[in-house]
Amino acid sequence: MARPLISPSILSADFARLGEEVRAIDEAGCDWIHVDVMDGHYVPNITIGPDVVKALRPYSAKTFDVHLMVSPVDAWIEPFAQAGADMITVHPEAGAHVHRTVQAIRNAGCKAGISLNPGTPAKMLDYLLEEIDLVLVMSVNPGFGGQSFIASQLRKIAAIRSMIDKGGHDVLIEVDGGVTPETARLCVDAGADVLVAGSATFKGGPDHYARNIAALRGDGE
Ligand SMILES: O=C(CO)[C@H](O)[C@H](O)COP(=O)(O)O
Ligand SMILES: [Fe+2]
């Protein structure tokens, strides 16, 4: 299969040793570091804020791929950009004016992503593909790691792939939720460029990270 970029979600890392975990996945060969930010309001879970991102920044020079599941979202863009985010991805339902929000992300010096929940149609991206660098297709409902992949999202990935290719847009497709070596292959075949994986990366502890990442990428196939 085509080689996807792998962005391990640190939601499944050992939170008591987060800096070491970020260094370990970096050394194990990941491409990006996926940071899930949850506010207990937009999603029913609370995770980490910009101070933690700032504290983690010295542990890896790789792309910090920050997935904001917070509402209202606009006030959090600048703090996460200042903390060291490279890519900031938002949900269109989490603010009143998503077009303005993605412009604010780019004005803050970051790449901009839009995330579509399983029930949100690809059509939402009309008029936005010119303004963004990434579409994050949620293949679980946001809020928790360790959920099962929702297969209907493969059709959405394929639809977005064709929108991007037809329009000649320079936009990556990332898939997040329930990604395993098996579902990874389906996502890449449907047109995904980047795969987020929490449980499947951190399974088995640090000695397994390199092997887990290689399996997700399809190395050796
Ligand atoms: O955004 C997320 C949840 O809202 C996480 O990135 C996602 O669930 C990753 O965890 P796993 O790979 O274990 O499914
Ligand atoms: Fe995520």
Image (spheres, rainbow, N blue to C red):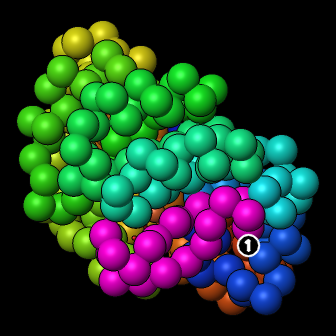
- What is the x, y in percent for residue 76? 52, 51
**What secondary structure is marked by label 1?**
helix
Front one among 51 and 202: 51
Front one among 68 and 133: 68
Residue type for callout 1: Tyr
Q: Residues within 10 Å of mark 1 (few under 14, many from 20)?
A: many
Q: Is residue 202 above or below residue 136?
A: below
Task: State the extent of the magenta-drawn residues as a range.
Answer: 35-53
- What is the x, y in percent for residue 113? 42, 39
Residue 214: name its quadrant: bottom right
Q: Is residue 130 above or below residue 53?
A: above
Question: Which residue: 30% across, 10% down?
Answer: 168
Question: Which residue: 24% across, 37% down?
Answer: 97
Q: Quadrant of the N terminus?
A: top left
Answer whether residue 180 is visible to the viewer in this image.
Answer: no
Answer whether residue 88 is visible to the viewer in this image.
Answer: yes
- What is the x, y in percent for residue 25? 77, 64
Residue 28: name its quadrant: bottom right
- What is the x, y in percent for residue 20? 87, 74
Judge whether residue 211 is colored magenta.
no
